[in-house]
Amino acid sequence: MEHYLSLAVKAIFVENIVLAYFLGMCSFLAVSRRVETALGLGLAVIFVLSITAPTNWLIHEYLLKEGALTWISESLATVDLSFLNFLSFIAVIAAMVQLVEMVIDKYSQTLYTALGIFLPLIAVNCAILGSSLFLVEREYNLAESTVFGFSSGFGFFLAIVAMAAIRQKLRYSNVPEGLRGLGLTMLVTGLMAMAFMSFSGISL
Amino acid sequence: MPDIEVAETTTQVAQPKEKLFSKKNKRTLSDPLSDNNPITLQVLGICSALAVTVQFNTALVMSLAVIAVLALSNVTISLMRNMIPSKIRIIVELAVVATLVVLVDQVLKAYLYDISKRLSVFVGLIITNCIILGRAEAFALQNKPWPSLLDGLGNGMGYAAILLIVATGREILGSGSFFGIQLVPDSFYAAGYENMGLMVLSPGAFILLGLIVWGQRMISKKFEDN
């Protein structure tokens, strides 16, 4: 149990997927203008990541990695399909995003219109594909992958909501012309990343 | 904002007969380098832009990989633009891009194994680099292969330019070297000079990019709202 807790803390704070690995920056910058939309996108990302991380782990473990096909026949032990990782991961993610889109469309029209173009774009959110690739690279098991997927999503959620709150306050301040928009957002993100780095002393 | 930029480019429809390097085609190639830079003005593709910029040589390899994928995917999608049903276009585009990235990844593993190890997951993440899908959606689906190739090359080089500037800054300030060659002499270190540890870590990249954007906006005088 302790092991999973420390994995979660690491994925949420110390190695935050946005602030330490720069993944999911596009939507992080584009959808952090208002807290409500940021909340919606953050929740959608948590949901998609919690599903895709274990699914992609299963696909990698039982279909693609070297020797994974031995459950079909012993003669397939030398088959290595891991070059298909990218293709199959992105297909799973695209399908999941389509599913989430349909669910949100049905149950919350306001959220659906607020997220607009960014909902289908979750499919190309680096945070999602990145987590799937990380869990292959770090050789997590199924339980670890699930925890990692959820915590990465939660880390993204935390970062984007905090950013949206900061930007909402910033709207009333007098910022130098050239720094408005992207420039200031990057600087604030840098400061946030520094703040999150202070968690790196935590070990459970 | 990116949406407006995209709308502008979509309105250009290629004329049936024009010279290979007509004025418009030249603009397609050169605009993304400064006036319509994919990173600083269209705000696309920042994800991978920062992670690989601790050192100059990883940034260089990453830039070349992105230019290759972007140009080829633009051409491929432009060739198929009349056959792709608009409802499933995202999936088709992703399939094209993912296939190209698999090819690039295999080439890197074969010829530049060390750097490909250091790039780790970020080669795979070219698939989800917003520039590639963004350009496919905004340009390649409406234009002929030749302008699409130029657009891909232009945007790829615009991306590479920012990537290399950030990488230069981070490597010189963070490690005191450039392209792996030590720049800051030993006597400096002996006199108490220390490398800026912050530049090697993620906040350095964010802050450096923020400053670059600021500089570029001051020069181009194109401002946005808060």
Image (cartoon, coloured by chain):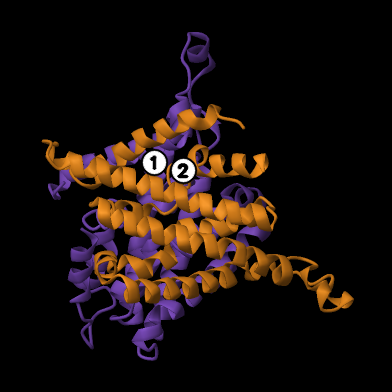
- What colour has chain B? purple
Measured along the vertical axis of the image, is residue A60 above or below residue A200? below
Q: Residue furthest right?
A: A74
Q: Earlier in the sequence, mark 2 or mark 1?
A: 2
| Labels 2, 1: one chain | yes
Q: Residue at x 52, y 41 (%)?
A: A15
Which quadrant holds residue B129? bottom left
B176 with respect to B81 (left or right): right
- Name the chain letter of the residue that bears numbered label 1: B
**Spot occupied by residue B135 in the image (x, y as percentages of width and height):** 33, 69
Could you say which is closer to the camera, residue A13 or residue B58? A13
- Name the chain letter of the residue that bears numbered label 2: B
A82 with respect to B134 (left or right): right
Could you say which is closer to the camera, residue A185 or residue B215? A185
B36 with respect to B158 (left or right): left
> Pointer 2: what residue?
B53
> Pointer 1: what residue?
B166
Q: Identify by letter the chain in orange.
A: A
Label 2–label 1 contact, CB within 8 A? yes
Q: How busy is the neighbourhood of tag 1: few (under 14 within 10 Å), some, or many (20 plus)?
A: many
**Spot occupied by residue B164 in the image (x, y as percentages of width and height):** 41, 45
Q: CA distance from mark 2 to mark 1?
A: 6 Å
Secondary structure beneath dot 2 equals loop
Q: Residue furthest bottom?
A: B83
**Spot occupied by residue A16 in the image (x, y as percentages of width and height):** 48, 43
The quarter of the rendered structure image containing the N terminus of chain B is bottom left
> Amino acid under label 1?
Val
Could you say which is closer to the camera, residue B19 or residue A104? A104
Measured along the vertical axis of the image, is residue B198 above or below residue B193? below
